[in-house]
Amino acid sequence: MPEPIGSQNISQLLKNPDMGASKLLKADAAPQGADFKSTLLDSLDEVNRLQMDAAKGIELIARGEEANMAEVFAAVRKADIAFSMMMEMRNKLVEAYRELQQMRV
């Protein structure tokens, strides 16, 4: 992994700019962090969890049990926003896929 750029590293890079490029090119090219599939699945699980929490709160209110209305409202709103965001991401992915299909090789 490349070194973080500090004030000393910046002055060295300014004196010898090729040194920094060669270090970056030799750096390990393996991806870091989670891959796209696992990130997408984690996001779907999170949206599902938010929706389940909101449904539990609504169910408590419907049964007449004690429930904090503000917390239930916040949970419903969070679930709504998360679902809307997920749908927008889906729409963008479908749009990008269709655009790729139409490309000529």
Image (tube, helix red, strand yellow):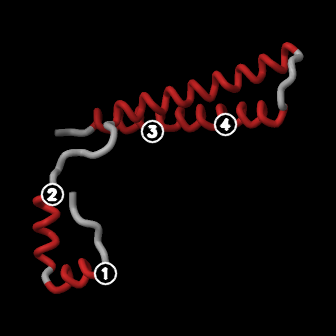
To which residue does mark 3 refer? 92
Choose mark 3 or mark 4, whichever is in front: 4
Numbered disc 4: secondary structure: helix
Q: CA distance from mark 4 to mark 2?
A: 40 Å
Relative height, residue 85 to residue 52 (above, below)? below
Please rate how many residues cluster around mark 2, counting C-alpha atoms within 10 Å: few if below 14, some from 14 to 19, many from 20: few
Quickly name the residue at label 4. 78
Give the spatial CA distance, label 3 vs label 1: 40 Å
Amino acid type, mark 3:
Lys
> Between disc 4 and disc 2, whose residue precedes?
2
From the viewer's perspective, is the residue at label 4 or at label 2 nearer? 2
What secondary structure is found at the residue carrying circle 1?
Answer: helix
Of the numbered discs 2 and 3, the one sitting upstream in the chain is 2
Q: CA distance from mark 3 to mark 4?
A: 21 Å
User: Where's residue 7, x and y in %?
Assistant: 31, 81
Q: CA distance from mark 4 to mark 1?
A: 42 Å
x then y, percent, for residue 79: 65, 32
Front tag of 2 and 3: 2
- Residue 7 got which mark? 1
Which residue position is annotated with label 2? Answer: 27
Determine whether the residue tagged by mark 3 lies in a helix, strand or loop: helix
Counting from the top left corner in percent of width and height, residue 68 is at 83, 31
Q: In the picture, residue 93 is in which quadrant?
A: top left
